[in-house]
Structures are given as structure tokens and as C-alpha cells.
Image (cartoon, grey):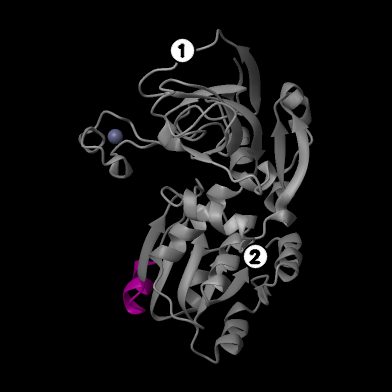
Amino acid sequence: MKYWRLEAPATLELHTDEPTQLTQQNNVKVKIEQILFSTSDYDTYIHGSSTGKPIVPGKNAVGVVSEVLDKERSMLKKMDRVAIEPFVPCGKCDECRNKNFRQCEQMQELGLTADGLLQNFVDLPSSTLHKLPDVLSNEKALYISYVALGLNITDALTFDRGEHVAVFANTKAGIILCQLLSYYKAVPIFITQNSALLKTASETGIFYAFDGNNLIDRVRTVTGGRMCKQIVFFSNSNFDIEQAYSIASFNAEVCIAGYGEKDTSLSIKKIAQKHLKVFGVFNGYGNFPSAINLLVTNTVNVDCFIGEKMQFDNLKQQLETVTGEDLAVKGKIIVVD
Ligand SMILES: [Zn+2]
């Protein structure tokens, strides 16, 4: 098996190891076909892993089952196309021992806290694999976790039909969320500092898309003075959280979303005075099947986010010309031969 490991910031090395044996825990071997390389992967690449140790990057990948430990009882069989959910329960904590994997106390996230998917073969628990319908292309399936994150956010917000929901984001994750909000009959207001994303927003039918200037006046006009009762603030955007508060109505919900490592200070005075409810949604765990369905039915359209391909074997050289700005709109796809 071959894998790229990030030894230090911006230093990838290709390693080759002997093939591994399947175990009771990692009971399915997957041949990886495509891996998404997008904004958060680029951040990891440039800054190193959040643990500070070497890590195999790669959070979103699709592949083909190449071996199954228990052929009689497994729901998967050789040659099945699968998407990989990058969250792996530890299998050891009390919750895992009681088979409440969703509540695992030490949930590992591939490519973030555990070695990720930038490999040609990987052994994984069958619970992390989702069989893909034939009509869903590999390229679109790489965006399942984005839709799943959006679903966990919409599940966490309490909005009514026709309510305005503001989304602060500087990457495509914000547009995917806006598409979901429209589907659930809310009215998204997309706020971004990325001009290319503003254009993409209008192309994908998001009517209210602003760049952050004169924001209070614009939101006041759109909402008839009511401002926003729900606000989603992607933690990797460069906005000041004060801007989110400034367009919040009394009793608003503010959801801080996504993997971003960026930190900021919160004005507790404003949270108290406006009776804001602030909470976080970190990932898309648990919503992969619904996300696959929304992509198959084209309820969420990710065509405009599919970027150029790079070859696994020459990755190091190809990454030298990639910028974070490019990836905000179109994610690159690493193809494994
Ligand atoms: Zn556990």
C-alpha cells in the first residue's frame, strides 16, 4: 500500500508499506479511487495537523471494495462502490462497548485526528462505508460530507417556513448549506468575502448574496426590519463574529459551524443583551445516507464545485501551484490509479 504522509507543514512524503491484514475492527479493504483536496485539506497541508504530529491527510474519498473479512454476513461485497464516512468510533470506550457508536467519547476523524484517506488501499470498519447508487458519480460523491454537515446544521436550527437565515462563509460549504435551507423553505442570505463565490451563489439560485459591506442596512431591507432569527457562522471564514451579532434579531440562534481551526473571542455582553443562543456543529456524522439521497435527486447541486484532477503519484509537485483561494470554489480531485 502507498500513502502520502504530511511530515511537517507543506512537507508531504510518499511511503510504501507491505499490504495489511483485515481485522474484526477494520473488516473491509477499500481501493481508493478519488480523494477530494479542498480548503480544509489545504489548511492542514499548510499548517500541519491539529495534533502537531505527522498525519496522512484526506477526509473525503470514494473507492471500491477489494476484500471483505466476513463474506457470508457482510452487507458489502467485492467491487461495490463506496463513499467513506471519515468518523471512526474508538471501539473501546463504554459507549462503543454498548454499541452506541454515535456517542463514542473518543471519535476519531480521518485526516484530522487520525490518519486519513490519501492512500491507495485502506482497511476500515464496514460501519464507515456507504454503498453508492450507480447514478451518483464519484466526483459528486466526494461532497457527501459537506451535505451531511449542512444537514446537521439545519437539524440543529429551529426555523419556520419563509424565515431568513444568514450564512457567513468563505467556502462552498456555505452555498451547499444555502441550497439545503432553500429546500427546507427558509430564505438564505449568503454573506461572503469571496467574489467568485458571490457569482456562484447567483448561478445556483441563491437570491440574496452579499459581500459584507453595509450589511446591517441590506439585511434590514431584505427582512423588513426583522433581522435574522437564525445565523450560521462558518468558523473558517474571516468575518468578525460581531458582524453576525449585528444582524441578529432578539432571541436569535447563532450556529458556529465547521472544522475551522481559527479562533475568535465572543462578546458575552451582546449574547446576554440580545438573548442569543450560541451553539456549535462540527461535522456531518450520522447524516451520510440522507446526504447521498439529496445528491442523487439533485436537490443539492455540486456540479459547480468540481475542480481539476491531480494524479496521486505526482501529488507533491502538483500541490506547489495550488492556492487556498482557488479551492474555496472548486475542490481539486486526486485520482489514484
Ligand atoms: Zn468509543
Q: Would you say 275 lies left or right of 61 here?
A: left
Pick the residue in front: 1 or 192.
1
Q: Residue at x 49, y 66 (%)?
A: 232
Magenta segment: 267-276
Q: How far across and how far down the image is residue 20, in percent? A: 49, 12
Where ligand 1 lies, by image quadrant? top left
The 10 Å Cα crowd at callout 1, few under 14, some 14 to 19, many 20 or more, is: few
For the N terminus, which image quadrant? top right
The image position of residue 114, as x and y in percent, is: 45, 29
| Residue found at the far bottom of this picture | 224
Say if 268 sits above or below 306 in the image: below
Q: 20 above or below 36?
A: above
Residue 237, above or below 322: below
Cα gap from disc 1 to disc 2, whole angstroms = 47 Å
Dot placed on the residue nearer the N-terminal end, 1 or 2: 1
* Label 2, residues with CA under 10 Å away: few <14, some 14-19, many ≥20: many
Tell me the SS state at disc 2: loop
Does the image show residue 333?
yes
Judging depth in this view, the residue of 121 and 320 nearest the camera is: 121
Mark whose residue sits in front, 1 or 2: 1
**Three-letter amino acid code at disc 1?**
Gln
- Is 269 magenta? The answer is yes
Q: Locate residue 232 relative to residue 268 in the image: left or right.
A: right
Q: Where is residue 136 shown, x and y percent of the image?
A: 65, 48
Q: Is residue 87 visible?
A: no
Q: Residue at x 65, y 65 (%)?
A: 192
What secondary structure do most residues of the magenta stretch adopt? helix
Q: Which residue is mark 2?
A: 192
